[in-house]
Image (cartoon, rainbow, N blue to C red):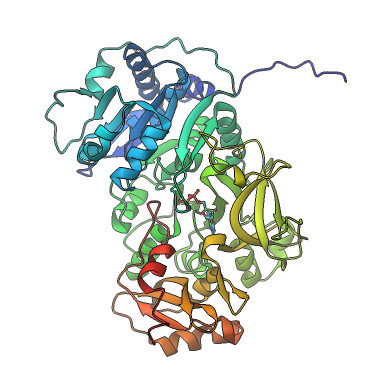
Amino acid sequence: MLLGRMMNFPLTVTHFLRRAKDYFPGSEIVSRATDKSLHRSTYSAFYGRACRLANALKKLGVKQGDRVATLCWNHQPHLEAYFGVPAMGAVVHTLNLRLHPSEIGYIANHAEDKVVIVDRSLLPLFEKFAETVRSIEKVIVVGDPHSQAPVSGAYLDYETLLAAEPDTFDFPNLDENAAAMICYTSGTTGNPKGVVYSHRSTVLHALVASLPDELGVRQADTVLPVVPMFHAAAWGLPYMAVGAGAKIVFPGPHLDPASLLDLMAAEKATIAGGVPTIWIGILALLDKDPKKWDLSSIRAMVIGGSAAPATMIEGFQTRHGLEVLHAWGMTETNPLGTVARVKHHLTKLSAEDQLRVRATQGYAAPFVEVRHTDDSGNVLPWNGESMGELEVRGPWVAASYFGGEGSDKFTADGWFKTGDVVTIDKEGYVKITDRAKDVIKSGGEWISSVALENALMSHPAVLEAAVFAAKHAKWDERPVAAIVLKEGQTATKEDLTTHIESRFAKFWLPEDYVFLNQIPRTSTGKFLKSKLRDEHGEILLKK
Ligand code: ADP
């Protein structure tokens, strides 16, 4: 073998941080606080503060490989931890503030967090589990305009710490395979498991996800991560934005549709990313008051985390001229895996067929490889029909979990089993029909809850629909649809069935409906079908 003669230059987050200072010192970072006031800063100030944080952590005894946890909303200090912590060689561990305190405690213990950076407004939450975490040595509190009083006792104040430190840091030369961030899966399937992103995976993911055919992040963009920074690194958007030198807008804790629309319009966001439940609310509000917000700056609204219904994609486009970009990913994939861009030769298709393509989960990003397999592990053909479990591999796909749990998710020949049931068509477009744990098996036949939900959400009176498996005496399981109607609208069970019946075999149609005010959500804003099953899973047995 003749080896290449190129430099073995490490791919580290530190490079992005230096680049931010050298090339884009004036790029803006806007954070909205709990009182909705906007705080403006620049990359130049951000760089200095990330250095101050690194100095402060070093003084507190943080060493390479130590875990520094965050329990924070999306804001600039969180970004400082995203960069300052890995660049000094430590590992930033983003705690999910929507989990039950005992679960957060479990996760912090598991990761052996040494220092925790916590929002002042989240201290009451932190105090519910703090005592259970043996490894925590220091707690740093990020201020809140609502309660300015200095923190006391054992707590350290973030701003006081930073103010005492120099705004430069002698960043170490790191191995690109060193850990940069730990993110836990939300544990909807067993105990939460830790995914350890490396500098290399984070950088490669950010570079590839920024490509024009992926999320397409450029210097001229204004990126608004609605997706929390504790959810799969906010999909890497902070790393992409800083890598590109783009303006970043952080929404803080106000994630209701009106507050988000206000911020998107005021700061002229060009790319925003979040889960469908967020966008369903936004679309409903825009439909009610289409003229109130000027969203002409928006280039792409990235939607992922669960399936974006085709009617929502279409509604944004035809009624409001807004482009939805549907993407699939997982905590285990850093997280981007596939993006539903319409390939050039498919732009010849009718608008309806193109919409069908855009509502798939898309085709794999460069360096992500996909296949799907049947129950015996046989690899299935890409024919758009054969259904099997999606498996992925690539440089930003987990090779194992922290602590070695969940080894059954990794195949002997080097693939990660996603737990998603999919078809893949001849163009490589992946279509998720269900998560394995949400699959509905009726009389031995398999029914796609995602397909039913998409159809139900195309009814004009339906705001949200989640289809789950209810127990059935004869058929074992039957689909039941939980429905949230739009404000002031009505629809009967019969109306809903009539609306969708031409699209499905008769046995696919929901056996019953439950009308709710809200569909229960997971900690990352997805429909929580296990709760629907717990609460309504036996309604058919009682009939
Ligand atoms: P959790 O859902 O357990 O909180 P993740 O956020 O890592 O953890 O979720 C990954 C899962 O989310 C995927 O396996 C898939 O089931 C689902 N998902 C992500 N994006 C999409 C999408 N665009 N369409 C359908 N499902 C999606």
Reply above or below: 455 against 238: below
Residue shown at 47%/31% (left/top)? 181
Residue shown at 50%/27% (left/top)? 180
Residue 85: x and y in percent read 42, 23
Residue shown at 57%/30% (left/top)? 203
Reply above or below: 456 against 292: below
The quarter holding residue 287 reads bottom left
In the picture as drawn, the residue positioned furthest to the left comes out as 149
Q: Which residue occupies the foreground of this view, 507 or 382?
A: 507
Q: Which residue occupies the foreground of this view, 24 or 461?
A: 461
Residue 72: x and y in percent read 31, 37
Q: Which residue occupies the foreground of this view, 406 or 383?
A: 406
The quarter holding residue 177 reads top right
Image quadrant holding the C terminus, namely bottom left
Q: Which residue occupies the foreground of this view, 277 or 483?
A: 483
How many numbered circles are shown? 0
Relative placement, left or right, of 48 versus 303 is left
Residue 307: x and y in percent read 52, 61
In the picture as drawn, the residue positioned furthest to the right comes out as 1
Reply above or below: 404 against 362: above
Asked if residue 436 can be seen in this view, the reply is yes
Relative placement, left or right, of 502 versus 349 is left
Asked if residue 251 can be seen in this view, the reply is no
Image quadrant holding the N terminus, namely top right
Residue 189: x and y in percent read 48, 53
Relative placement, left or right, of 10 versus 20 is right
